[in-house]
Amino acid sequence: MDVEPNWDFYRTLLAVLQHGSLSAAARELGLTQPTIGRHIDALEDSIGAQLFVRSSNGLLPTEAALELRPYAEALAATSAALLRTASGSRGRVGGTVRISASEVIGVEVLPRILVPLMDAYPDLDIELSASDAIEDLLNREADIAIRMTAPAQDALVAQRIGNIPLAFHAHRRYLDKYGRPQSLDDLAGHRLIGFDRQTAYIRSLVKQFRIPQDIDFSFKADSPLAQLSAIRAGLGIGICQNGLAAQDPDLEHILADVFEIPLGTWVVMHESIRTTPRYRVTFDALVEGLTDYVRKTGRTNPA
């Protein structure tokens, strides 16, 4: 490679990889389709390899494109972090903070915590990544993360919040119709709500917390939010956070004496940003708000 490609070409490459077509990438980036095509052609010329082949299902990435993808993703994360850093100035609480949290925490818990924070600091902008994927704080894919696993990297500042308990719950309408199980074995006679596939994390929960491995789920969903919605609708019995279930008087806690998953929770950020005002106040607000949320579940906690 004699000439270093324009960084915009990698952003275009990533958009085409994510969306599968030039037209979709153009809409995402606010460019024209011919411009997207020129970027891909120029990048192919620079690296001396074809990046996509056309098929009936759209553009298929070649091995060369797949090899470049993690580097394009790293550039995108770095660019976003640079803009967030540049958006604030020292001494004032303003600018952008990107928070990573699970779907359930991001949708069901964080908004109420963020209201007083953003009221107090009107120049603060929050970006929320609500996903069960763990974003890399060291590479600044997010500024602050709420995690259900203990952080392992030394360069991270972490505050343990405690255990968020999860347990079996069901709508009383379902229980009045089909009965209330008295043991884990009784679950076999009920319509159960659960996960569509066992990830490594779910397998560890099954092993650690006596979740019967042969459960036959009648309703399956990869999304914990979809499972929670199904429980609230009275579709069957499922596992959800006790704190969320307690907010709905029609949801009943099932098998409380024999089953509970204590979900350890941490608020985490990179140590290099700990003294920047907007990150510090956001971190503190999340710690305070989540600690209060855990306290209301009756499980304040432990170091």
Image (cartoon, grey):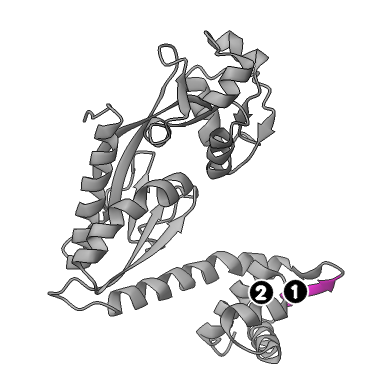
In-image side of 240 versus 114 (left or right)? right
Q: Is residue 302 above or below residue 199?
A: above
Of 68 and 58, the residue lying toward us: 58
Please check the rendered image and state whether residue 232 is part of the magenta-colored stretch, yes or no. no
How crowded pointer 2 is (Cα within 10 Å; few <14, some 14-19, many 20+) is rated as many
Of 256 and 36, the residue lying toward us: 256
Q: Quadrant of the N terminus?
A: bottom right
User: Measured from the top left, where is residue 275 in percent x and y?
Assistant: 16, 63
Q: Which mark is residue 52?
A: 1
Q: Which mark is residue 16?
A: 2
Q: What's the amino acid at mark 1?
A: Phe
User: Measured from the top left, where is residue 227 in percent x and y?
Assistant: 57, 38
Question: Which residue is pictured at 28% across the width and 35% down the height?
Answer: 294
Q: Is residue 119 above or below residue 84?
A: above
Please check the rendered image and state whether residue 50 is part of the magenta-colored stretch, yes or no. yes
How crowded pointer 1 is (Cα within 10 Å; few <14, some 14-19, many 20+) is rated as many
Q: Can residue 71 be spotted in the picture?
A: yes
Question: Which residue is pictured at 12% across the width and 74% down the height?
Answer: 91
Q: Quadrant of the C terminus?
A: top left
- Asked if the residue at tag 2 contacts the one at tag 1, i.e. Cβ–Cβ closer than 8 Å, the answer is yes
Alpha-carbon span between mark 1 and mark 2: 9 Å
Determine which quarter of the picture holds residue 59: bottom right
Q: Which residues are magenta?
A: 49-55
In-image side of 152 versus 212 (left or right)? left
Q: What's the amino acid at mark 2?
A: Val
User: Measured from the top left, where is residue 197 in percent x and y?
Assistant: 65, 36
Looking at the rendered structure, the secondary structure element under dot 1 is strand
Q: In this rendering, which labeled residue sits more in front, label 1 or label 2?
A: 2
